[in-house]
Image (cartoon, rainbow, N blue to C red):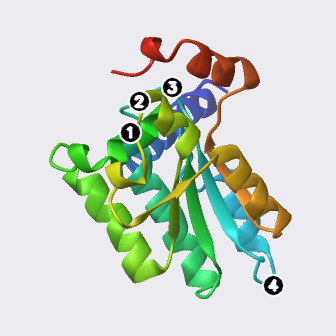
Amino acid sequence: MKRSMGLLSVFGVLSLALMSLSFSAYGDDKSLPEVAPVVAKILAMQHQPDGVVFDIETLDENALPRFAPYVSKQIQLIRKKFPDVDIAVVTHGAEEFALQKKEEAKNHKLHDLFNQMVKDEGVSVHVCGAVAGLKQLTQEDFPDFVSFSTSGMAQLNDYKALGYTVVPIRQLNKQQRDELFEHPSKYLK
């Protein structure tokens, strides 16, 4: 009995070590599973979905560089099974500011990754105009590979209405979303 408990402990430690290694390949956020649960469901489908939209909404202006490699990996997994499926990314929280033109030098890897997704993978990338407006930003403040949507939530709802499967990466609850719009200075530099 003692020996089997010892083996279970060793197995548990090894499993945790392997899991932490696999997470490091997808960015710095250790809370993300190797395969997003909704992506796992998509990969189990027999028929191609109508489309897939990734939903990213945080209160952290520095979150997008952490999530982008993970989203890219999820897109690659989907593309292996369904190479022609339409894919979009909607970023509509404080993290979207990393995609500003003026942030390109600081976030060049992020900009290169999203630009590559748009040009080579045909992925649509959207930012939220309502959130951008909190800093008086317009379409001109974002690179050409970014689509400027009046509302990120409305854009997401449009994709849902078209039958797209939503892959939530991070989402704000109503209270957090209200807090962002009522007290933007707490979250925006």
CA distance separating discs 2 and 1 = 9 Å
The structure residue drawn at horizontal position 55% and vertical position 45%, both measured from the top left corner, is 128
Q: Earlier in the sequence, mark 1 or mark 3?
A: 3
Residue at mark 1 to residue at mark 3: CA–CA distance: 11 Å
Q: Secondary structure at mark 3?
A: loop
The mark that comes first in sequence, 2 or 1, is: 1
Mark 1 or mark 3, whichever is nearer to me:
1
* Closer to viewer: mark 3 or mark 2: 2
Say whether residue 17 is visible: no
Q: CA distance from mark 3 to mark 2?
A: 14 Å
- Distance between the alpha carbons at the discs numbered 2 and 4: 42 Å
Residue 9 image offset from top left, x and y in percent: 54, 29
Q: Which residue is mark 1?
A: 97
Which residue does the image show at 81% across and 70% down from the upper left? Answer: 162
Q: How many marks?
A: 4
Which residue, given by chain and number where applicable, does mark 4 sit on? Answer: 47
Secondary structure type for disc 4 = loop
Disc 2 designates what residue? 135
Position of residue 103 measured from the top left corner of the image (x, y, whole percent): 24, 43
Marks 3 and 2, the one that precedes in the sequence: 3
Mark 1 residue element: helix
Left or right for 90, reference 24? right
Q: Name the residue located 65 percent from the left edge and 25 percent from the top edge.
A: 177
Q: Tell me whether the residue at label 2 lies in contact with that at label 1, contact meaning CB atoms closer than 8 angstroms.
A: yes
The three-letter amino acid code for the residue at tag 3 is Leu
User: Which mark is drawn over residue 59?
Assistant: 3
- The CA span between labels 3 and 4 is 36 Å
